[in-house]
Image (tube, rainbow, N blue to C red):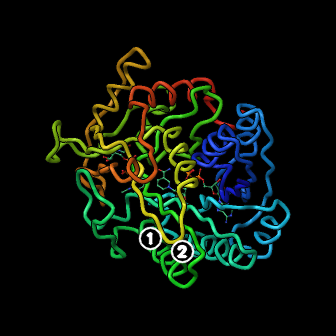
Amino acid sequence: MRVLLTGGAGYIGSHTAIALLARGHRVVVLDDLVNASEVALERAARIAGAEIPLVVGDAADVDLVRSVLREHRIDAVIHFAGLKAVGESVAEPLRYYGVNLGTAIGTLQAMAAEGVERFVFSSSATVYEQPGPLLREDAPVGIALENPYGRTKAMIESIVTDAAAADGRLQAALLRYFNPVGAHESGDIGEDPKGIPNNLMPYIAQVAAGERERLRVFGDDYDTPDGTGVRDYIHVVDLAEGHVAALEALAPGVLTVNLGTGQGATVLEVLRAFERAVGRELPFEVVDRRPGDAAVSTADPSRAHEVLGWRARRTLDDAVRDAWRWQSRNPRGYRG
Ligand code: NAD
Ligand code: UD1
């Protein structure tokens, strides 16, 4: 298939481009580069040994998306474009609603106008109203979530569901990612957060690189094996392969699937895994809980296996090793 990746120059999109090319699909990226670098795509193209044309622009611009769909004779869209920083979404809600809803609606409108029927959306485990262990896809999804970012994901899931109810030709997948981590095993592409990382794994990587003094562990009084938060960390290359499987499994209607491993790890277990990869102890201190954090969030990944024939194959140690390879080879990310 010829696949358009909106937001495809970003962390998950660049890895997915490689996975698609490896399966013989063709890839085009539309990205406004607000949180990405062209260098990521140049490197992804080199790893894949194929071209990845980049159109720099806004995925909310219906005319632009239509012209890309036409020009490249696109069969399917994977919609990664959007803003993803939870704290920023609380400070700038209108920007988050505007960009996240605007790009989803704009892309779907362009697809309808050009007769493109396949749509895969980057949703999140954050849509579950009640986080917990082994979450199943039929668990309640909330609009009354903790933050505007999470609400945009739940709203877009509803928008896609309504669009599919109105147009029986639409074939959509809502992929609920758990915690994507790691990097391509080449060490050439990975996560390149701007400023202080919000998420655990890139933060530890910067502590290991000596760029941050110590990890702050947000609470050790949860009801978990060591008191720290439990999450389902999924290697980004497994996640990328999950997109290929979802694309190839599309059928009319909406398919909702968790992409996770089913395994939980605590904050301290992630830290220990990183220490093994780096070969030394890393400094940390326990501080207060972060507002809005759940004790536990892990996936029941069985539907993905049943419906997509996909399951995560890489371990947390693989993810940590690959994240460290990326971080140590690219201490300044794509900036040089
Ligand atoms: P990312 O920021 O690296 O990628 C998003 C991309 O979208 C960036 O390249 C950015 O430049 C682009 N973009 C933003 N606004 C745009 C616009 N108006 N038009 C075109 N491009 C635009 O983030 P990521 O981690 O690769 O996440 C990809 C998707 O997956 C996002 O929708 C995110 O919300 C979702 N998601 C991510 C995680 C995670 O932990 N990384 C978890 C669950 C869901
Ligand atoms: C966070 C977002 C979620 C988003 C996801 C991916 C919140 C409340 N949730 O999920 O909406 O979809 O990122 O972008 O922000 N931790 C520390 N110290 C740190 C960073 C994290 O102890 O410096 C802990 C957290 O308390 C948590 C775990 O590490 O227990 C993972 O945190 P993080 O990587 O931020 O992911 P989530 O909180 O699961």
| Label 2 close to label 1 by CB (< 8 Å) | yes
Residue 193 position, x and y percent, is 56, 45
In the displayed structure, 332 sits above or below 288; it is: above
Quadrant location of the C terminus?
Answer: top right
Q: Nearer the viewer, residue 287 or 46?
A: 46
Quadrant location of ligand 1?
A: bottom right
In the displayed structure, 201 sits above or below 304; it is: above
Element type at mark 2: helix
Reading the image, the residue beneath label 1 is 148
Residue drawn at (39%, 26%) of the image: 317
Count of number-bearing discs: 2
Real-space CA distance between mark 2 and mark 1, rounded to the nearest whole angstrom = 7 Å
Residue 219 position, x and y percent, is 23, 45
In the displayed structure, 259 sits above or below 51; it is: below
Q: Quadrant of residue 51?
A: top right
Check the image and name the residue furthest to the top: 279
On the picture, is 294 further left or further right than 322?
Answer: left
- Report the amino acid beneath label 2: Tyr
- Report the amino acid beneath label 1: Pro
Residue 327 position, x and y percent, is 56, 29
Q: Closer to the N terminus: mark 2 or mark 1?
A: 2
Element type at mark 1: helix
Residue drawn at (37%, 65%) of the image: 127
Q: Residues within 10 Å of mark 2 (few under 14, many from 20)?
A: many
On the picture, is 149 further left or further right than 16?
Answer: left
Reading the image, the residue beneath label 2 is 97
Residue 233 position, x and y percent, is 38, 41
Q: Nearer the viewer, residue 171 or 18?
A: 171
